[in-house]
Amino acid sequence: MMEQTLVIREAHQEDIAALAVLMDELGYPVSEEDMNTRFLALQEHPDYQCYVAESDGEVIGMIGLIRELRFERDGVHVRIGSLVVREQQRGGGIGKALILAAEGWAGSVGARALALNSGNREERTGAHDFYRHLGYEATSTGFVKRIL
């Protein structure tokens, strides 16, 4: 059996359909049209970055990053807004490769830390173990209130 080649690269507009599928797998269903609108807006903003993992020409994972300033801390910080690997591809180092790309981008923009929120839903316990294994610490609980 041949070894698959993994490529981590910046996302392009041609990846929209794959990004929509990945968002659905992450639990956030989105149409290709809405994903296209979101992607184009994010792509134009210098504080956002999106990388995809590609194997044999197929996008099988993505990570979306947000550079931000904080009220409670000095300096630039980067937040992982989305990280997902196709379910059948998980466990093969793809998520780690995406995290390493994120850490590289965070360093290139002078970030002091890389952070993420991950829900406490039962199906996310594997993700929590993954983050801990890569040196991330659990620090807070998130809340949200929809206003529109």
Image: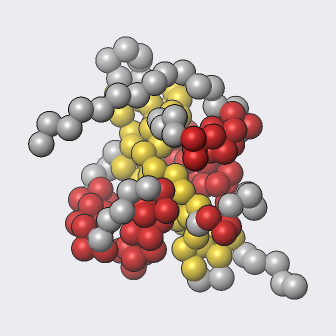
Report which quarter residue 137 is drawn in.
top right
Task: Please indicate whether residue 60 sits to the left or right of residue 29 in the image.
Answer: right
- The residue located at (69%, 38%) in the rendering is 129
| Along the line of sight, the residue nearer the viewer: 119 or 101 | 119
Task: Please indicate whether residue 46 sits to the left or right of residue 87 in the image.
Answer: left
- The residue located at (39%, 43%) in the rendering is 66
Task: Please indicate whether residue 58 sits to the left or right of residue 130 in the image.
Answer: left
Vertically, is 80 above or below 89? Answer: above
Q: List x then y, in percent, for residue 56.
A: 65, 82
Quarter of the image with the N terminus is bottom right
Quarter of the image with the C terminus is top left
Residue at the front extreme, as displayed: 122
Q: List x then y, in percent, for residue 43.
A: 31, 60
Vertically, is 119 above or below 10? Answer: above
Q: List x then y, in percent, for residue 79.
A: 45, 38
| Along the line of sight, the residue nearer the viewer: 85 or 99 | 85
Query: Does residue 33 appear in the picture of this structure?
Result: yes
